[in-house]
Image (cartoon, rainbow, N blue to C red):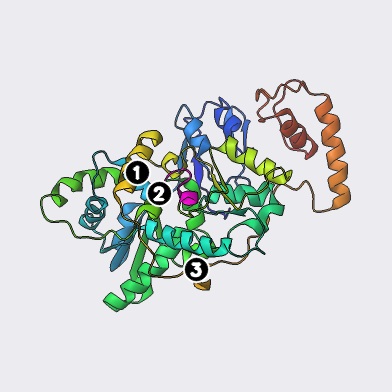
Amino acid sequence: MSQFKPVILDPERCNGCVSCMKRCPTEAIRVRGGKAVIRYELCMGCGECVKACPTNAKKECYDSFDGIKDFAYTICLPSPALYGQFSNLVDINVILNALLALGFNKVFEVASGAEIVSAGTQVLLENKDFPRPIIGTGCPAATELILMRYGHLAPQLSPIEQPEVIAAKLAVDEAIKETGLPREKIGVFAVTQCAAKVSSLKSDSARKYIDRVLAVKEIYFNLLAEIPSTQEKPLADLARAGKIGIGWAAASGESSGLCIDNYVSADGAENVVEVLNQLENRRLHGIDFAELNMCSSGCVGGSMNVENPFLARARLRILRNKAVLSVPQISCGEEFCRTEYQPKDVCKLSQNRAEAIKLTKTIQDIHAGLPGLDCGACGAPRCMALAEDIAKGEEVACKLL
């Protein structure tokens, strides 16, 4: 990830219970001195620690809604996961109009960007030379996990940009033509559901298109207050996306939009890791596409949502069934693709091969003397992780040594 910290810890609330440490898929957390410590070079912003913390000591980082005052013209990019937060919603235009009532000048659905990604992926699937399975990059946490732990799979990551970035590009182009304002006076605000999205949208590649990233849970109550007033008058028809784009908010939604059968879809950190291990061991054959969502149930399971993910998923299913099948008017060209993903060496023991081999032997020797319970009482998630910490000369808190 970038230097941006997707999650921060409140030491006053933390009681060192190790719940977050045991749930972290990249083992980025240790407990030292009775408090959790986050190793940000390993943090992918999945939000598992936020969900697991019984004392609410973890908090995602995102921008304030007050930032709309910093721009002459503002654009809101709502995630389709936002729609599933509201009960009895029969028309997405209710939410889109409420966003305008909050003060935004323009609304452009992320779901529209998702439909362009789906169309582009269908074209990519026709390229028999692209390695299989093609791995979707809609979940930035899963993408980061691959780059950190499964770097050899990087060539299989889809080169198509995130839906938020595509939506931002199109929305800004429209706004400049409509208003004549320069780009710097136009503020683009993405509304998203997880810390990984915030972090990815604040990366160098996305930052020139997106100015602020808001949390669903922060804007939700403001929208709830505006909805009654918007329903008192005819709604402006602002919705552009259809079934495919709306479906991206839930697990298997991206895959379903490709109209293919030979895909695998995994949601939840444990299931994603299992699929990646299968891919790593070349035990997954005959699959053209892999959709990986670190959150259970997909984006509706993000830690910055307010609603139960299963209920939100059911609501989205109703909205999706009512929506029409929208065909993107814009093709997914090179301007919507990014450069190749590069594996990260944050998990390497050493850049020097001989030193790495020596450290590996030291770790194995230390691990052989540990109980192998993986209980977390030492402040490390597993005995092997503790052995690695010791071998690297890091301060540990194991009373067994």
Q: Residue at x 67, y 44 (%)?
A: 284
According to the picture, the residue beneath numbered tag 2 turns out to be: 247
Q: Residue at x 55, y 24 (%)?
A: 17
Q: Position of residue 166 (x, y in %)?
A: 44, 64
According to the picture, the residue beneath numbered tag 3 turns out to be: 336
Q: Give neighbour class at mark 2: few <14, some 14-19, many 20+ (Cα, 10 Å).
A: many
Q: CA distance from mark 3 to mark 2?
A: 21 Å
Q: Is residue 260 rendered magenta in the image? A: no
Residue 382: which quarter of the image?
top right
Q: Position of residue 6 (x, y in %)?
A: 51, 47
> Which quarter of the image is occupied by the C terminus?
top right
Q: Give neighbour class at mark 3: few <14, some 14-19, many 20+ (Cα, 10 Å).
A: many
According to the picture, the residue beneath numbered tag 1 turns out to be: 316
> Nearer the viewer's eye, disc 3 or disc 2?
2
The reply, left or right, for residue 41 in relation to residue 324 is: right
The reply, left or right, for residue 204 in relation to residue 287 is: left
Q: Earlier in the sequence, mark 2 or mark 1?
A: 2
Q: Secondary structure at mark 1?
A: helix
Q: Are marks 2 and 1 in contact (CB under 8 Å)?
A: yes
Q: Position of residue 39 (x, y in %)?
A: 62, 42
Q: Earlier in the sequence, mark 3 or mark 2?
A: 2
Q: Earlier in the sequence, mark 1 or mark 3?
A: 1
Residue 201 drawn above or below residue 378: below
Q: Secondary structure at mark 2?
A: helix
Give the residues drawn in magenta, as a range: 248-256
Q: CA distance from mark 2 to mark 1?
A: 7 Å
Residue placed farthest to the front in the image?
A: 261
Residue 22 drawn above or below residue 301: above
Give the residue type that dot 3 points to.
Phe
Q: Is residue 306 visible?
A: no
